[in-house]
Amino acid sequence: MDEIPWIEKYRPRRLDEFIGNQAIKDLIQGFINKKNMPHLLFAGPPSTGKTTTALILARELYNDNLAGNFLELNASDERGIDTIREKVKDFAKTIPNNQIGFKIVFLDEADALTNDAQQALRRMMEIFSKHTRFILSCNYINRIIPPIQSRTAVIRFTPISDDDIKKLIDKIVDKEKINISDEAKSFLINIDSNRKDLRKIITILQSAYYMSKDGNIDVKLLEYISGKIGGERISELSKSILEKNPNKARRLVIEMLQIGADPEDLIRDLIKVLEETPGIADTKRINMIKTIADYHYRIATGADPYIQLPAMVIELSLNNG
């Protein structure tokens, strides 16, 4: 059995393998061609390619010779000022031994750095900029202090498109010789429709492959592994609510929980369907979403979803007129 996690096995290593925003790809190619770059701040949701892009840039500049030229730290693990003063400063102050003329410090999840650590980092970005470039990545740019933002070129990453996700799924399916239905592919692409978490999609696909018989993957298996309910089930639940059928809605939601549905995903998907369903009066739609939000809060604060979710769909069914 292949022991390498597929999220690493299929992580792009070169720019021509890059999946995502073409404008970002062109920008990175410009840095590579000129063999120069400013300090960079990669901002965007998780699993949009920020870390991968930093690694690709370093490999292309240093021809895979990263030792001594590239320092990678995860700021969520090492978030204090001591890390900045010791590890980062010790690396940044030494003269680079390469033809490019500078080294790179990559601070992943830099929005986890304390304010004091960010202030110390800001000063180092000024002092050592001649022979050290800094790349910071963050999920929430508002948590990066303005003096750092003003000293970096901000590159904003957005969720990967459905077409690009499908291309990667097709590549993995071909390489691993997986038999997967078009319906199952569509399920994977939309498994996290709000976030488009590519790591999650690939991990679920690998898990399904290991659990499948003869490499055959269908929607039922993906539902079981992911705890995610397919669109048809959610649509049926929404329809029963709108038709004021509380008994059917209650039965459907209990069935979903029994097969392992994640309550958070179920609530999020139900809201999405109700938002997209035509013909619902604005006041009615708002009241329904408010009701869902109330039950979501109860679950988030520790209430039993096996009690709350059936109660929620009953209330929605009885009070949606």
Image (tube, rainbow, N blue to C red):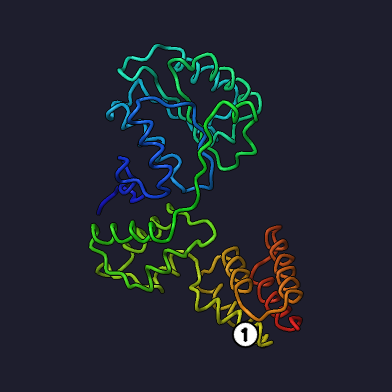
Q: Is residue 258 left or right of residue 314?
A: left
Q: Residue at x 26, y 51 (%)?
A: 2
Location of the C terminus (image quadrant): bottom right
139 and 210: which one is in front? 139
Mark 1 = which residue? 240
Q: Amino acid at mark 1?
A: Ser
Above or below: residue 234 compared with residue 2:
below
Q: Position of residue 186 (x, y in %)?
A: 41, 69
Q: Position of residue 212 (x, y in %)?
A: 31, 68
Location of the N terminus (image quadrant): bottom left
Q: Residue at x 59, y 26 (%)?
A: 80
* Residue 67 position by quadrant: top left
225 and 165: which one is in front? 165
Q: Residue at x 45, y 23 (%)?
A: 133
Above or below: residue 194 compared with residue 128:
below
Q: Position of residue 6 (x, y in %)?
A: 33, 51
Above or below: residue 128 compared with residue 261:
above
Q: Is residue 64 left or right of residue 278?
A: left
